[in-house]
Amino acid sequence: TGPTGVGKSTLAKAACNRLLQYFEARLAAEPDFVPVVTINAVPPNGNGFSWKDFHIRLLSGQSEPLISRKLVVPRQAPLLPRCALEAAISNHSTADALRRSVEGYLRLRKTKFLIVDEAHFCKNPEAARTQMVYGKGGLGYQTGAIWSLSGTPAPKHAGEIWPMLLSFGATDK
């Protein structure tokens, strides 16, 4: 952690480059493998958190195609496999469709590390945003390792650092 402008993003880029070097042989053998994904947890325009924006940022940062087409509507039913049909059509939410796309991306690309910049926005352990990043079944859980970056890890009180401590494995609850 550190204050704004001291190089957290530069450090994250260097870590990404090191991970790419480390996995160079695997990347050559598996062109679809993506060892590390970065995401900025900051709310858009300083307003409330937007799931849609969060997922679009993550997918667009990975050059995922057709992001604007991640909405399941009934007329798409004939295009979906039978096993996914009911679940997909039961939820018409763009944010949920994007979430499924992100989860599928991480699973199919076998991503090993998630770097979360501005992680202090994931400070409330009960909040859906925090659960999406740090919770069981969240993005970090799916990748296996999280690197949290924050210039302000506990802006109001020390308890706000708890979710990041969980991600570091510093505590068991």
Image: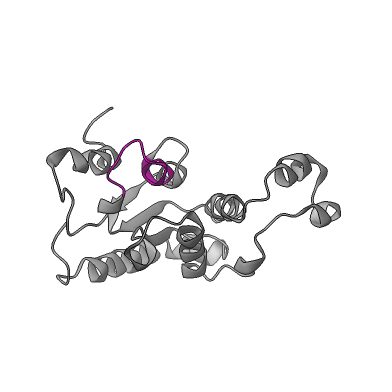
Q: Is residue 94 left or right of residue 9?
A: right
Extreme front residue here? 47
Whether 7 is drawn above or below 94: the answer is below
Q: Is residue 18 left or right of residue 165?
A: right
Query: Can you give x and y, in whole percent of width and height, for residue 63 in the image?
Result: 53, 71
| Residue 142 highlighted magenta (yes or no) | no
Query: Can you give x and y, in whole percent of width and height, for residue 16 in the image?
Result: 34, 65
Chain part drawn in magenta: 122-134
Whether 108 is drawn above or below 65: the answer is above
Extreme top residue here? 173
The residue lying toward the viewer, choosing from 132 and 43, is 43
Q: Tell me which residue sits at (26%, 37%) in the image.
A: 169
Query: Can you give x and y, in whole percent of width and height, for residue 66 in the image?
Result: 64, 69
Q: Is residue 64 left or right of residue 143?
A: right
Looking at the rendering, in which quadrant would you find the C terminus?
A: top left
Q: Tell me which residue sits at (86%, 53%) in the image.
A: 78
Colour setup of the view: one colour
| Residue 130 highlighted magenta (yes or no) | yes
